[in-house]
Image (cartoon, helix red, strand yellow):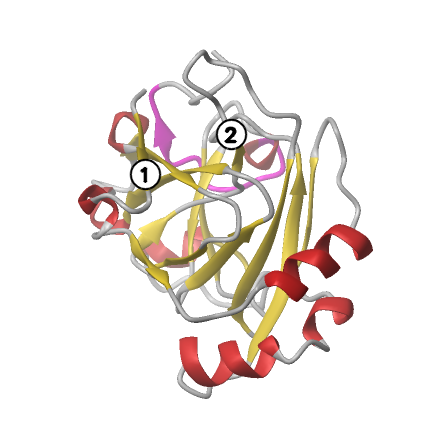
């Protein structure tokens, strides 16, 4: 799989880079106040230590046009695709070290399925504020892989989303296909059959190989 840059033209349909935000204090606090497993990932939708910083309001006013947001994190070690998700509203990813984002688009879903051959890989450098559009399918970041195939030891990534995203799933009546994908609040999910999420009952919507950057 070819790994492109989030600064390349190829990334433009998936998202863009936000400039003008000073994220130094945010990333410093992420390093100081959050855990980073070496053999798994940990995700928290909202982290008070991050949300008390001034940039919380800056993102709310600027990146989200005054809408309420949450600032959380996804830290740890991951090299696999496993699932793809989407939200109503963009997501910001801000890593402390280089990461790889595996993405596709909602329009790539055909008859309720998406072949993983449609998935593209993009490298996001440390400190970059990457906006992932709401029409972009994505999931947990992956560890960086260098030109020789060496996988980095792990990552810490700030995750900014509309407030209450990825919290408890609302009870709904299934009206159409999309309702089958709702996995948490503002989180629609397609799982690969080999993923733990599929074993937990998530909709199996990914076909083909479960991408593993370590291989």
**Residue 139 x/y as whole percent:** 48, 44
Q: Is residue 183 magenta?
A: no
- Quadrant occupied by the N terminus: top left
Give above or below for 116 relative to 123: above
In front of the other: 33 or 20: 20
Is the stretch drawn in magenta largely helix, strand or loop? loop
The part of the image, by quadrant, that contains residue 131 is bottom left
Residue under numbered circle 2:
144
In the image: residue 16, left or right of residue 211: left
Lower sequence index among marks 2 and 1: 1
Label annotation for residue 5: 1
- Neighbourhood count class around disc 1 (C-alpha, 10 Å): few under 14, some 14–19, many 20 upward: some
Give above or below for 46 relative to 4: below
Question: Which residue is at 60% across, 56% downward?
Answer: 158
- Which residues, given as a range, are shown in magenta? 199-208
In front of the other: 64 or 5: 5
The part of the image, by quadrant, that contains residue 208 is top left
In front of the other: 180 or 192: 192
- Neighbourhood count class around disc 2 (C-alpha, 10 Å): few under 14, some 14–19, many 20 upward: many
């Amino acid at each position: 799989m070819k790994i492109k840059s989030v600064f390349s033209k190829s990334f433009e349909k998936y998202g863009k880079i936000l400039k003008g935000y000073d994220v130094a204090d945010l990333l410093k606090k992420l390093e100081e106040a959050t855990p980073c497993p070496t053999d798994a990932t940990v995700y928290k939708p909202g982290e008070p230590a991050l949300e008390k910083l001034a940039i919380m309001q800056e993102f709310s006013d600027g990146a989200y046009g005054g809408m309420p947001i949450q600032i959380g994190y996804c830290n740890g070690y991951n090299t696999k695709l496993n699932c793809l998700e989407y939200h109503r509203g963009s997501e910001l990813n801000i890593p402390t070290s280089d990461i790889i984002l595996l993405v596709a688009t909602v329009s790539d879903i055909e008859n309720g399925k998406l072949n993983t051959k449609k998935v593209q890989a993009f490298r996001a450098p440390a400190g970059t504020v990457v906006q992932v559009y709401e029409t972009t399918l994505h999931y947990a970041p992956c560890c960086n892989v260098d030109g020789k195939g060496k996988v980095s030891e792990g990552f810490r990534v700030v995750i900014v989303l509309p407030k209450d995203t990825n919290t408890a799933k609302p009870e709904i009546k299934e009206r159409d296909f999309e309702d089958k994908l709702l996995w948490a609040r503002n989180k629609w999910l397609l799982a690969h059959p080999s993923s733990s999420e599929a074993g937990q009952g998530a909709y199996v919507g990914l076909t083909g190989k479960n991408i593993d950057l370590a291989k």
